[in-house]
Image (spheres, grey):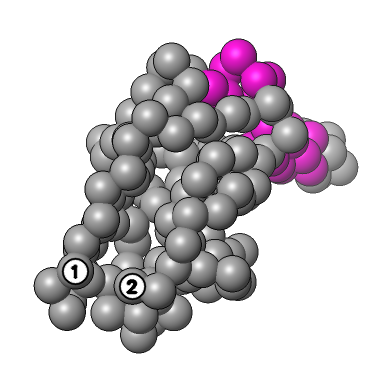
Amino acid sequence: MHKLRTLLLCLNLAFLCACSRKPSAKEGRAKLVGHYQLHIGSSCAENGIEFASLTLDPTGKYGQEGKFKNGTSYKIGGKKWEYNGDGNIWLDGLRVGKSLEISPEAEMTNASLIVEFSQSPSILLDPDANCFFEKDR
């Protein structure tokens, strides 16, 4: 019985370590490349966003586009993105507000956002909010 408990504890610890490991800079960049859609939770729905997306290119450039329910839209391209293996993505000139919300009044700003690496990466606008960019599968 003691051996079984020890084995289960070891397996749980191995699982936790594997899930929380941040990929290296090279690994992370490769996993992040692709197209992302904004998951519009209650915390960003109040800003009137209809849709938003990010496209991260392997060249280190990205594009952002979106549309609001009031009919205004935006499209930005050729901006720089970086991932250095620290669990955050750096986006140069991201169109977000001062509290990292997407709204019609938002301006372009440099942003360092948390990345959750799971089966498919997610880029969090705010770790306490349910508003994040999820990679297309």
Amino acid type at circle 1 is Thr
Q: Earlier in the sequence, mark 1 or mark 2?
A: 1
Residue numbers of the magenta segment: 8-29
Seen in the image, is 69 located left or right of residue 57?
Answer: left
Indicate the position of residue 66 as horizontal and vertical percent values. Answer: 25, 57
Q: Are marks 1 and 2 in contact (CB under 8 Å)?
A: yes
Tell me residue 11's x, y (percent): 71, 35
Q: Amino acid at mark 2?
A: Pro
Q: Main secondary structure of the magenta part?
A: helix
Q: Which residue is mark 2?
A: 104
Q: Residues within 10 Å of mark 1 (few under 14, many from 20)?
A: few
Asked whether 17 falls inside the magenta stretch, the response is: yes
Q: Which label sits on residue 72?
A: 1
Q: Residue at x 33, y 57 (%)?
A: 38
Foreground of the two, 64 or 78: 78
Instruction: Please report the residue visible at 83 percent of the width from the left and 39 percent of the height from the top.
Output: 6
Does 117 sit above or below residue 108?
above
Coordinates of residue 15 in the picture (x, y in percent): 66, 37
**Cα–Cα span, label 1 and label 2:** 7 Å
